Structures are given as C-alpha cells and as structure tokens.
Amino acid sequence: MTTNATPTAGAQLVAPKDHTLIMIDFQSQMSFATKSIDAVMLRNNAALVAHAAAGFGVSTILTTVAERSFSGPMFTEITDAFPGQALLDRTSMNTWEDATVIERINEIGKNRIVLTGLWTSVCIVGPALSAIDQGFEVYVIADACGDVSEEAHERAMERMIQAGARPMTSLQYLLELQRDWARTETYDMTTGIAKRFGGAYGLGIIYAKTMFGASEGSHAQAAE
C-alpha cells in the first residue's frame, strides 16, 4: 500500500489556539534551591516561553504557591508578558488539585496542556500525571523547568514521559508556534523574541539582519 505525503502539519505539533499553557511557581523561594539549571538560563527560558505565549495569544494560566506567606512573587520576566493578568495562588503542591485552577482550565476548554515551572519532580509531575489520568494530552517544556538536582529533574522527566507526556524545549515552543517564516503577521514578533531570549540563535539573527538584511521568509516571498 502506497503512502501519500501531504504538505500538512502533524497532529502532535502544538499551535497557538490548540492548548493551554500553565506556568507554575516561578518564584524566588522555589528558585533558590533549583540546581538542575542555571538561574539566569531558567529565567531567560521562562521569559521566552511567556513572551511567545503572550505574542501568539495562547490561553495561559499563571499560578503560584503561598505567594505572600512563603514563596515570593513570580518572576517579572513572566508577569511583564501578561500585564494585569491575575495569578492563581494555591496551597496545594499539585496544581491539578486546586479547584480555582481547574475551574479556569475547564473554562478555557482545551484538551492539550503545556506545562512549565518549578520544581519538576513535584509541581510539574503532579499536574502532568493527573491531567494524563483524566484524558488530557500533556507537553512539558523541559528547559523551562528546574529541580533541586539534575537527578531529580531527569527522573521526573522520565516518569512523565513514561506516562505519555511529550517533552520539548523553550525555543522549540516558540518556533513551533511560528512554524512557517512566510507567516508575516507574526514574523517580526517571533524573531524579536528570539533576539531577546534566544541565546546564540538570537545573536545569529541579529548578525544576519544587521550585516546582510537577511530574512528567513525571503525564499517563500521570492517564489510568489
């Protein structure tokens, strides 16, 4: 039997309108003990995810734990991307056991969940396994999560993957939302986010545009 290829995206790729992003416990107290990833890189990756989600209009939930009594404020790199959005504060370590968060998830009504936050082995494993158990499709942005050790982070990722979660990275998330450089309405936003938070890749964009006026979408435009 012959299989015919078509120029269409696979169903497992994320798109701006098909999922809810939940950013969990990016707070000072949680980050102090995070050792699996450098704090500067963690903040940068979280900012990249937040600005990507905000720019593409992704349904996003920002949640904290004991914000005023213990864990402190959420990273401003994240809240700056969502000015005026309320943070859902919890007492539960497992976000999925908080009635207010679940009410918001049900209001949004999307079956695909993307998770990121601190710590991987507690605050990400909990909602990931709970959501999968209830029939949700779950993705985890691995390099925008962190834990008290590399061992803790890696074992948590393995546990979630074994349960059916799909891992991805922060830059992958941004580029998967864009997916085609010929999408001119979001091109400048995507490359702008990459230039600010995309590390060496962002530097490459700055160099190419400054020195040569290069554009990733030029090939598609030339063909029209």
Image (tube, rainbow, N blue to C red):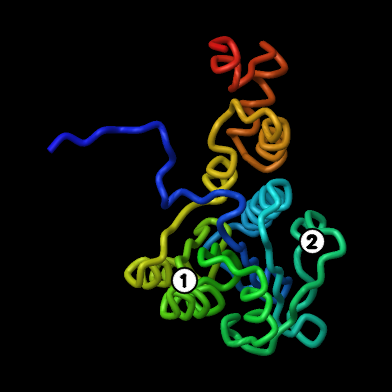
Query: At numbered mark 2, what does the secondary structure look like: helix, strand or loop?
Result: helix
Image coordinates of residue 154 in percent, x first then y, are: 41, 66
- The kind of residue on which mark 2 rests is Thr
Name the image quarter holding residue 1: top left
- Residue extending furthest right? 84
The answer to whether the residue labelled 2 contacts the one labelled 1, judged by CB atoms less than 8 Å apart, is no
- Residue at 74% x, 77% y: name it: 88
Q: Is residue 215 visible?
A: yes
- Residue at 77% x, 80% y: name it: 67
| Front residue of this view, candidates 9 and 198 | 9
The mark that comes first in sequence, 2 or 1, is: 2
Q: Is residue 32 visible?
A: no
Image coordinates of residue 128 in percent, x first then y, are: 48, 73
Q: Does 10 sit above or below residue 122?
A: above
| Front residue of this view, candidates 151 and 99 | 99
- The kind of residue on which mark 1 rests is Phe
| Left-right relation of 138 to 211 | left
Q: Does 25 sit above or below residue 43?
A: below
- Residue at 71% x, 76% y: name it: 64
Q: Does 91 sit above or below residue 2?
A: below
Image coordinates of residue 75 in percent, x first then y, are: 76, 63
Write down the residue under mark 2.
Answer: 79
Image coordinates of residue 61 in percent, x first then y, are: 69, 68
- Residue at 42% x, 52% y: name it: 12
Query: At numbered mark 1, what does the secondary structure look like: helix, strand or loop?
Result: loop
Name the image quarter holding residue 212: top right
Q: CA distance from mark 2 to mark 1?
A: 26 Å
Write down the residue under mark 1.
Answer: 136
Dot 1 crowding, Cα within 10 Å, few <14, some 14–19, many 20+: some
